[in-house]
Image (spheres, helix red, strand yellow):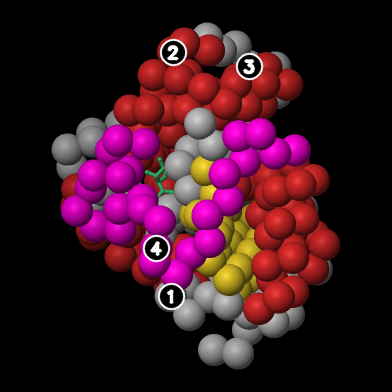
Amino acid sequence: DEVPVIAIDGPSASGKGTIAQLVAKELEFHYLDSGALYRLVALKALQIGAAVSEENKLAEIAANLDVAFKDEQIFLDNMPVTDEIRTEECGLMASRLASYPLVRKFLVMRQRAFRQPPGLVADGRDMGSVIFPDALLKVFLTASAEMRAQRRYKQLIEKGMSANIHELQRDIQKRDQRDSNRGVAPLQQNADARLLDTTSLSILQAQNSVLEWYRECC
Ligand code: C5P
């Protein structure tokens, strides 16, 4: 595939979504928020009362997911769910079902379909390792757990949701552990990915690092 991809992977609340969207805007590339797909499967599972243990049922949800991404809004079964999928409940459920190989398998094609000219910026956990192994630039974007909890806290408060920073940090660490230790597509820095630690970087600085690396390699 000739269409260039920038893969940005990293732990939850590291800021990869923000940075990926800004880089996409700057380059006028498409943007894939792969975590949203796992969150959408989670929301659907919660809606119909599917249990975390039911791998086949969850895989079926993933295979038949009716989703649309339009103007920065996300729709499930034609209903807007942009904010609803951001709750910690959805995040935790997403991280649980993301460990099922069958669920992941059914989301592969859907993710690759985002690769359209002139290019794609994709963020997640396995963009560089599994979904787009031939990405032109792979970035592993991270930050300290404390900083990530603070950022997620601010994000939720700005959306008018309630949050407790200690609970957030605990949940983030739980999720990181599960994402890093699962058998399929674990969260880890690829040998060919460049490390970007944003703990003490501004959004602009982080965005510029990615853009500079991209211009270097292309
Ligand atoms: O990135 P975000 O926090 O929205 O992702 C929610 C969950 O979906 C993650 O905790 C992770 O378990 C899962 N995920 C994944 N692979 C991706 C993106 C997200 O397993 N590429």
Where is 205 relative to 118, above or below?
above
- The residue positioned 66% from the left and 54% from the top of the image is 20
Nearest to N terminus: mark 1 or mark 2: 1
Q: x, y (%) of residue 186?
A: 30, 53
> Of 196 and 93, which appears nearest the observer?
196
Q: Residue at x 68, y 67 (%)?
A: 213
User: Which one is earlier in the sequence, the residue at label 3 or at label 2?
Assistant: 3
Location of residue 191 by image quarter: bottom left
Q: Nearer the viewer, mark 3 or mark 2?
A: 2
Q: Which label belongs to residue 190?
A: 4
Task: Please indicate, yes or no, whether residue 150 appears anywhere in the rendered image.
Answer: yes
Label 1 element class: loop
Q: Which residue is found at the position 47% from the left and 11% from the top?
A: 166
* Residue receiving disc 3: 161
Q: Position of residue 146 (x, y in %)?
A: 52, 22
Point out the stretch of residues depicted in magenta: 176-202
Frontmost residue, 59 versus 24: 24
The quarter in which the C terminus is drawn is bottom right
- The residues tagged by marks 4 and 2 sit, at their Cα atoms, a distance apart of 30 Å
Residue 118 spot, x, y in % from top left = 73, 80
Q: Magenta span: helix, strand or loop, mainly?
A: loop
Whether label 4 touches label 1, CB < 8 Å = no
Between discs 4 and 3, the one toward the N terminus: 3
Task: Specify the label residue 133 is tagged with.
Answer: 1
Please give the residue where the numbered disc 2 appears in the rendered image: 167
Secondary structure at badge 3 equals loop
**Looking at the image, is mark 4 or mark 1 nearer the viewer?**
4
Disc 4 packing (10 Å; few <14; some 14–19; many ≥20) = some
Please, what is the three-letter code of the amino acid marked with disc 1?
Pro
